[in-house]
Image: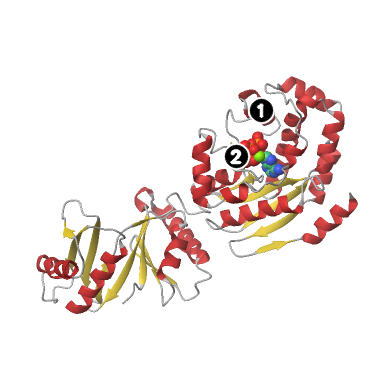
Amino acid sequence: MNFDRIMIRYGEMALKGKNKKAFEQKLQSNIARMLRKHPETTIQKTQGRMFVHLNGEDPHEVMQKCQNVFGIHSLSFTVKVEKEEEQMKEAVLLAFNEANDAKSFKISSKRTDKTFPIPSQEMNPILGGHILRNTENVKVDVHNPDVEIKVEVRHEGTYVTAQDYPGGGGLPVGTTGKSLLMLSGGIDSPVSGYLTMKRGVEIDAVHFHSPPYTSERAKQKVIDLAQELAKYGSKINIHVIPFTGIQQKIHREMPEGYSMTIMRRMMMRISEKVASKENILSLTTGESLGQVASQTMESMNTINEVTNYPIVRPLVSMDKLEIIDIARKIGTYDISIRPFEDCCTVFVPKAPKTKPNREKANYYESNADFTQDIEDALEESYVIEVTADHVKTNQQKDDEFSDLL
Ligand code: ATP
Ligand code: MG
């Protein structure tokens, strides 16, 4: 015997009316997308719950994919058997064995089909006795069990539900709008993207790339990171912005101490333009406070001046160790620490100004005109489309660009 479905519980408590419908539809389509590699699965919606029917697909693989979907509170394996004692016994044993290392259990039976001859109170000891006979050092604990096994005898059959697995929490991606994630190859910005998606936000990404100072492999890192993020949501379009020209101009014409601040201001201006063109209403960054020179309050103030777009900064209150913990959990850490150059580190001055101010940044920028350079960068930009299982890249345009250098 094996589990034939997964029960999905979501926190619909906070949802009302139209919101609830949109939430459920998104959740269902996000689960379906996540299970594309398991074509036999089907999703059934019942009051306040969903069931993924496995139809022979591997239960654990499907469970793992579903656990990544935001908007799910918890999940459990479930099996439907006949209203027949032996099958029910076998099913509760399967459900108990699912809970690794459980030493105590409780069976909660419910009989909605009153034609079934055994009342629920009598069912508990019959089914529990079967577990006790087939395990060692296991006991019943009705107050604080390691695992609670739910048995529901309904008209159409008996449902046995095993332990709860945690879901991704948050809201289904796509229910709260879209943001443009400024994605570097570092540790922070992917985590930031993940946390934003967890709040139901769909993301596109923008990446600044400076060939030949930054290599194809550095760009591949960003594609791989986006692919990890796509596992939690939908398709991510990476807008790759060739940034070499602008960086060289900054390096040539701006004072060294302000080059990093001005570079970041250019990134903001360009990101805002990309977002606006794509009808995206906010930017998301991996900025934190106090880690490096670019992350002081003065710096944030000076960089933020060039855009009036809302900037989502989910990491602003986090310690580096907390960020690393999340990066490990979501599978981006090992990619982020691959040792390839980032456009910011290539041109970074030895002593960047840690307390820049707006007046000076404006003054220095007024000595050079970047309008055309920004237009050119946008003109040369291209999109890489990333989903959890494929990458579609307009490599040709990239090659043409590299040839120009
Ligand atoms: P990360 O770990 O995300 O690279 P960081 O700690 O290195 O961040 P900074 O170098 O100050 O911090 O960068 C701050 C933010 O600016 C990044 O989190 C990211 O959102 C954005 N950013 C930096 N470099 C790039 C890039 N090449 N392309 C797109 N966005 C970038
Ligand atoms: Mg970085």
| Disc 2 target residue | 286
Q: How many marks?
A: 2
Secondary structure found at label 1 = helix
Q: Is residue 347 above or below residue 226?
A: above
Q: Which mark is residue 293?
A: 1
Work out how far the residue at label 1 is from the one at label 2, CA to CA, in angstroms: 14 Å
> Is 356 drawn above or below residue 348 in the view shown?
above
Callout 1 amino acid:
Ala
Looking at marks 1 and 2 on the same chain, the residue that comes earlier in the sequence is marked by: 2
Q: Regarding mark 2 in the picture, which secondary structure is present there?
A: loop
Q: Is residue 217 above or below residue 264?
A: below
Kindly tell me whether residue 21 is visible in this rendering. yes
Of the residues tagged 1 and 2, which is closer to the observer? Answer: 1
Residue ranking furthest to the right: 404
* Picture quadrant of ligand 1: top right
Viewer can see residue 285:
no
- Beta carbon at label 2 within 8 Å of ligand 1: yes
Question: Residue 221 in the image: x percent, y percent?
Answer: 67, 52
Residue 180 — which label? none
Task: Sort mark 1 into few (<14), some (14-19) or many (20+) by Cα contacts within 10 Å.
Answer: some
